[in-house]
Image (cartoon, rainbow, N blue to C red):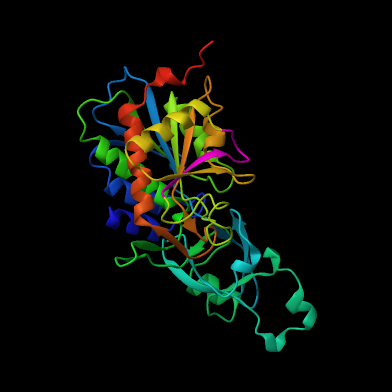
């Protein structure tokens, strides 16, 4: 499981360029039926699926926030466009990888002008994406294009390597939003594959391009046509910013059950069932009501004849930046609750009683 998380989080895969992530998933897909569509959405099906049971879809998105080469200047600096939501002040002075057409990764630095050359007005001015440049150590556009093979349209991702601290039980790395969710789908399905009889046919749907508009989930939900879905997310941890009574996504406090965000309002009876199963199995969880943000649940719950969707979040510090922390215990709690739902949920209990 740790190797799976390591390989997924280290993989290069900003929105629209998830191919390396798909290759990692394929290496871990032996227990399942594997397929991939033209958008690079991945479908994993339990080999025990019958086609006669209600369908439980396990969703996560495979992309990470990144950038794209927008233009290359005469002096060799590279202008960028954002793929996904960034806070501009988090971008400068970090290293990134640019993936060329040949597949080569070229390391660059997001250029940060030294204070020696900045006016007071520049120091206090808000950053704009149009003013951020990547320096790959060249002195001309021709060097960048001819020697390094970088072209307009090439994708860019943070340059970070995964680590696991056995003493604290904490992961460090990039793209926890949402490679941790992707890993949780695979690990949940791996454990479910060992169970002889399940009330559902289980399909993992690993969607692309969530960070640029939940586009992949629009496709996967139409293909899978789930009767119920669980969305796994690397959810932004908030325990450093609020007191213990206000925080709703604290690291090492269990999986986050999301009641609401800007993309959806949860299915109350499914939420209640999930909380009952968590309490019965002593699985730690925390309830969250979010005024902003969104997940693939926003797409999935409106498909077909409407789909009850549960969002389970793995608290992850500093998402949408280069560097993230998350807890192994929270990851396991998320998998354990999803497994309990897949084994025990009565779909009929979700229907409104009149």
Is 152 drawn above or below residue 78 in the view shown? Answer: above
The residue nearer to you, when weighing 332 against 56, is 332
Residue at 48% in and 32% down: 271
Q: Is residue 258 magenta?
A: yes
Q: Position of residue 291 (x, y in %)?
A: 64, 44
Q: Is residue 210 visible?
A: yes
Q: Residue visible at 56% across and 27% down? A: 302
Q: Is residue 248 magenta?
A: no
Viewer-proximal residue among 214 and 350: 350
Q: Residue lying furthest top in this view?
A: 354
As drawn, 31 above or below 201: below
Q: Nearer the viewer, residue 139 or 250?
A: 250
- Camera sees residue 11: no
How many marks the image carries: the answer is: 0
Residue 306 spot, x, y in % from top left: 53, 23
Q: Nearer the viewer, residue 262 or 93?
A: 262
> Who's the residue at 73% across and 78% down the image?
123
Q: Determine the image quadrant of residue 132.
A: bottom right
Residue that sits furthest to the bottom in the current view: 116
Q: Position of residue 71 (x, y in %)?
A: 63, 65
Q: Magenta stretch?
A: 254-265
């Amino acid at each position: 499981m740790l190797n799976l998380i390591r390989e997924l989080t280290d993989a290069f895969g900003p929105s629209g360029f998830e191919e390396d992530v798909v290759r990692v998933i394929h290496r871990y897909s032996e227990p399942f039926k594997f397929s991939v569509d033209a958008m690079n959405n991945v479908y994993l099906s339990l080999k025990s699926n019958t086609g006669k049971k209600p369908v439980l879809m396990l969703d996560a998105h495979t992309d990470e926030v990144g950038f794209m080469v927008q233009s290359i200047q005469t002096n060799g600096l590279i202008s960028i466009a954002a793929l996904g939501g960034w806070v501009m002040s988090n971008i400068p002075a970090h290293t990134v990888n640019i993936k060329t057409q040949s597949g080569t990764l070229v390391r660059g630095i997001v250029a940060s002008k030294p204070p020696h050359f900045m006016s007071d007005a520049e120091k206090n001015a808000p950053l704009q994406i149009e003013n951020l440049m990547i320096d790959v150590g060249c002195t001309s556009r021709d060097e960048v294009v001819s020697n390094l093979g970088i072209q307009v349209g090439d994708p860019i991702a943070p340059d970070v390597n995964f680590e696991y601290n056995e003493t604290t039980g904490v992961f460090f790395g990039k793209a926890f939003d949402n490679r941790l969710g992707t890993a949780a789908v695979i690990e949940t399905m791996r454990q479910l594959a060992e169970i002889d009889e399940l009330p559902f046919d289980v399909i993992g749907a690993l969607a692309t391009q969530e960070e640029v508009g939940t586009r992949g989930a629009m496709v996967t939900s139409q293909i899978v046509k789930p009767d119920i879905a669980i969305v796994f997310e690397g959810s932004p941890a908030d325990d450093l910013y609020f007191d213990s009574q206000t925080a709703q996504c604290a690291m090492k406090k269990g999986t986050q059950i999301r009641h609401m965000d800007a993309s959806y309002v949860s299915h109350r009876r499914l939420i209640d069932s999930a909380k009952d199963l968590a309490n019965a199995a002593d699985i730690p969880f925390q309830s969250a009501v979010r005024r902003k943000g969104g997940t693939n649940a926003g797409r999935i719950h409106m498909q077909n004849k409407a789909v009850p969707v549960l969002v389970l979040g793995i608290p992850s510090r500093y998402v949408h930046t280069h560097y993230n922390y998350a807890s192994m215990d929270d990851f396991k709690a998320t998998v354990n609750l999803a497994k309990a739902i897949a084994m025990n949920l009565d779909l009929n209990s979700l229907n409104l009683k009149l």
